[in-house]
Image (spheres, rainbow, N blue to C red):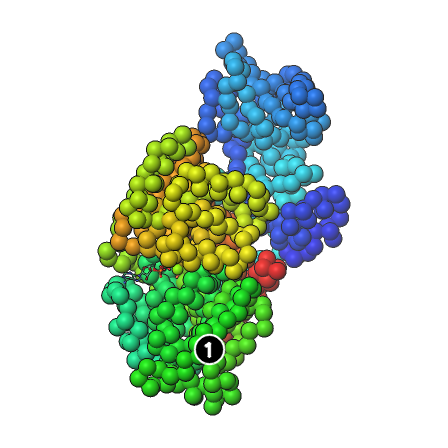
Amino acid sequence: MEILQPLDELEWIPRPKVLALRRLGLETAEDLLTHYPRRYEDRHQFPEFPREESDTPICLCGEVTKTRILRFGGWKKIFEATLQEPNAHALSQPLTLRWFNLHYVQKMIATGQQLVVFGKPKLRGKRLCMDHPEFEVIEHDPAEVGIHFRRITPIYPATEGLSQRVLRSIIHRLLVDLSDEPLEILAPASLVQGDRRKSIHAIHFPESWAARDKAREYLVLSEFFAMQLLIASRRAEASARMGESHCGRGKLLDKFLAGLPFELTAAQRKVIEEIRRDLAAGHPMNRLLQGDVGSGKTVVAIAAILLAVEAGFQTALMAPTQILAEQHYAVLRRWLEPLGVRMSIRTAARQEESGPLPLFADGESPANARVSRATGARDDAPNIIIGTHALLYEAVSFSNLGLVVIDEQHKFGVAQRARLTARAPVPDALVMTATPIPRTLTMTVYGDLDVSIIDEMPRNRGKIITAARDESKLVEVLAFLRKQLEAGRQAYVIYPLIDESEKLDVKAAAKEYEEWRERLHPYRCELLHGRIPAAEKQEIMERFRRGDTQALISTTVIEVGVDVPNAAVMLIENAERFGLAQLHQLRGRIGRGEHKSYCILLSSDKSPETEAKLAVLEKTIDGFEVAEADWDMRGPGDLLGTAQSGLPGLKIGNLKRDAQLMREARAAAMSILAADARLESPENQRFRRLIVEQQGRTFSHVS
Ligand code: ADP
Ligand code: MG
């Protein structure tokens, strides 16, 4: 047999098991061999039964001495099995295993059986219980002892209809059958030491923990290498595309900067220079601009836009929400119309063109005349098109598009970015994100982009103070809020309707709003949520921006981008329901002016998770610290959504724990491509196939 053989061609695997394997996404022998254990049990020797409860799960072995079924609440059932220690003595205590409403378990467990169980022992009354432990029935087949017992035993991600035991036996047999097949080595010798076959064997059936660790390192490095090779090749491909300079001389930019009511920060200036160099270069720009909420990314985007406009190109600015697109449109009109720049907005709800103001104040033309000669486009074609996703999917005709700016990139996917820039001639692309992500993630998720970071906040920002409070303190919080309104500040109240796509209970929202109106009387407040028609939403935001209303009772529709400097208080109800990153984004709506700002997190949830989460926000306003903490608490799952990153998922590597290995793999991939960009040399051919294969896996994810 060979490694790519489909599993349904293997006669010795029972058909129902083939179907179960397919449910796990396993189609070929290779899929199975890379179906790595999620943990291991050292079954050389089992510990004595515990006498106390514990928060870490333990692995025990014993004999079932009794089973029973308890019914409660009509149809609900508890299945209990009593497990006795093998060499029970006077002091040993049996363990009660319990399963709630799990029909199939009671069919699998019977008195007299020996079981291996894995779970947390907890005191329930006087009994020590394990609820819903993982378990395996021991069958006394001597031939299989070396596979399942007296060894470090692998435990796999499994599925219904496929027990650990069966899955383990299949993988074991496969390893034996494949032991004469050549296995292609998929990582350069400079990166990995050891042998792929041995590593795969040892990751499933390690002889020792050290052997497991060594095998794991080999496989993680190989996996990371494949990923970084894909990223590096994408990057090489992008910069090999023919581009052209999209950079004007900068007079328009200077004029804009001279009119700004503030000085740029050093970080903003540095980043603008990086962008200017990219715009002027012959190859297309692919740049990520990272900067915490409120660090002033919009001004940088405008700078890039003006450089391209001055050179005679059209530009596009894409935002994830209509509210944000409208805000950009308003800000850009205010700042740029006096400079003679024309813009239009395209959202699903609205199309409008501003202007026309064909001439610059001093009679200089923004080289638009050149546009018309070169492309035959209308002389008054907008210089900037601002919009939402509508820019991608509706027939927006660009003329001479030179630069695409995508705001809040994390709200879009890679595919959408590609869609906007995949045209000839190739426009430059600047993507911006306020989601600070840990560096190892940056070099993965955004590994094909150059990165600029704004690591400095504008001066004269008021401090943000964050406090978590129990919901019972609402009265005090309210008094505080009113005092702030009295002092002339404005406030957001975020109410806990999490998912905007869920059908909104308009009545509940209206009720919420009525309550707040009373609480805040005589200050004016308005209600804002995703179900309000676009035009009305826009008017509500406008009234808030002008200060006509003092408080906005809102869902998370204001989560990204919204900028109202006088809004200095944010009250978040049911804060436990939001994720850390989202709370940080929300909080980013305040502290945008010179006023001291306050973020109050209301929650009556006393769970350790919630308390830890809210404590992070009380402690720091630094987005990177928040991101790291978020990562520690939750893992990078969300950040690495496959549609987002456009990368195949990881099977064994862990982006946080294995950060150093990622760095090594990245260096190896880059050096191979630097020496042989098209992977033409004989020893590099195999890497070309690796890229193709990775791409296959990626696209099946994205679709
Ligand atoms: P974000 O990075 O979150 O998109 P914005 O671009 O919306 O932030 O900027 C936040 C606020 O800070 C805006 O009101 C903007 O005008 C202001 N701002 C930007 N740069 C500076 C600066 N250098 N000094 C003072 N205020 C600034
Ligand atoms: Mg912004």
Q: Position of residue 379 (x, y in %)?
A: 47, 85
Residue at x-position 48% and y-position 74%: 353
Q: Judging from the image, what secondary structure is the residue with disc 1 in?
A: loop
Percent across and percent down for residue 621 are: 32, 47
Q: Is residue 305 visible?
A: yes
Horizontal relation, residue 125 to residue 477: left or right: right
Q: Quadrant of residue 256?
A: bottom left
Looking at the picture, tell me which residue is in the foreground, 242 or 540: 540
Front in this rendered view, residue 492 or 695: 492
Q: Give how far across and how far down residue 198 sits, in percent.
A: 53, 50
Point out the residue furthest to the front here.
522
The one nearer the camera, 138 or 537, is 537
The residue type indicated by label 1 comes to Pro
Work out whether residue 280 can be spotted.
Answer: no
Examine the rendered structure and indicate whether residue 198 appears above or below residue 288: above
| Residue shown at 43% from the left, 88% from the top | 370
Name the quadrant of the N terminus: bottom right
Q: What residue is rendered at 48% in x and 50% in y?
A: 528
What residue is shown at x 35% (from left), y 82% (from top)?
360
**Neighbour tally class for label 1: few under 14, some 14-19, many 20 plus, Cα within 10 Å:** many
